[in-house]
Image (cartoon, grey):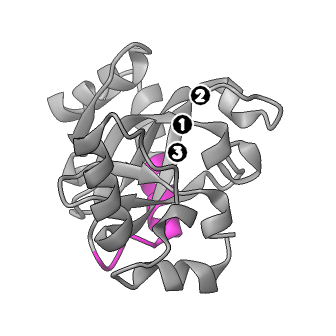
Amino acid sequence: MNPARLRQLTHTPRANIERLGEKPYFFMPRTRRNWIDAMTNGQLVLQCVVQANQALYDADNKESAPGVVIYTTDRTRCLDGGFLYTVAEQVQWVKRDPYPRDTELQDVQRLLLDERSWFKIILPPALTWGVPTVMMVTAMMPQELPGGCIPPHRLIPCIIADNGDLWHLKPSAYQ
């Protein structure tokens, strides 16, 4: 990731939004308006991949697949890759924990273990040091991943719309 290009993307309103991401099809007018609003004025955040279909780690793969990501819109942490990586590690620990200590952590574990679940939740504060952090399943397309796959650091910039929708960026927008 190019830090200077990321800093430029934090400023709104953004111009030339077509270079930032794939505009939804014309026959989806509400989605298209949401995308335009998000790319123009939405908040830039880093998402950290918690887990994903193995194909998304292969640069030769051309197929979309689901992945579980986390992000926060907290202005002090939304671009803090170290914080997100640490939270992702905490979440992965919960997934492997044979005896999660409370029902909130058991719920997180259940969602992560069910490969067919599709969710968007706020993580328990015990995992995030009180910083509101979203964990969700999202469709990931290789053309929206740097180098066509999930990078080793698992951090990928995206835009959050006012309604909470997550929009992936073209790698050329931030590399």
First in sequence: mark 2 or mark 1?
A: 2
Q: What residue type is labelled 2?
A: Ser
Label 3 crowd bin: few (<14), some (14–19), many (20+), radius 10 Å: many
Q: Quadrant of residue 79?
A: bottom left
Give the Cα distance between marks 2 and 3.
Answer: 15 Å
Q: Which amino acid does label 3 sit on?
A: Val
Q: What element does badge 1 sit on?
A: strand
Q: Is residue 85 magenta?
A: yes
Q: Can residue 72 be seen in this view?
A: no
Q: Quadrant of residue 112?
A: top left
Give the Cα distance between marks 1 and 3.
Answer: 10 Å
Residue under label 1: 140
Residue 83's spot in the image, x, y percent?
A: 44, 66
**Image vertical order of residue 107 relative to residue 86, above or below:** above
Label 1 crowd bin: few (<14), some (14–19), many (20+), radius 10 Å: many
Residue under label 3: 49
Q: Does the magenta stretch include residue 42?
A: no
Give the Cα distance between marks 2 and 1.
Answer: 5 Å
First in sequence: mark 2 or mark 3?
A: 3
Residue 56's spot in the image, x, y percent?
A: 66, 32
Q: What element does badge 2 sit on?
A: loop
**Extent of the magenta region:** 75-88
Quarter of the picture containing the N terminus is bottom right
> Of residues 108 and 9, which is closer to you in this image?
9
Residue 76's spot in the image, x, y percent?
A: 32, 79
**Residue at 18 percent of width and 34 percent of height:** 104
Q: Quadrant of residue 141?
A: top right
**Residue at 32 percent of width and 48 percent of height:** 32
First in sequence: mark 1 or mark 3?
A: 3
The nearer-to-camera label among 1 and 3 is 1
Q: Which amino acid does label 1 sit on?
A: Met
Residue under label 2: 64
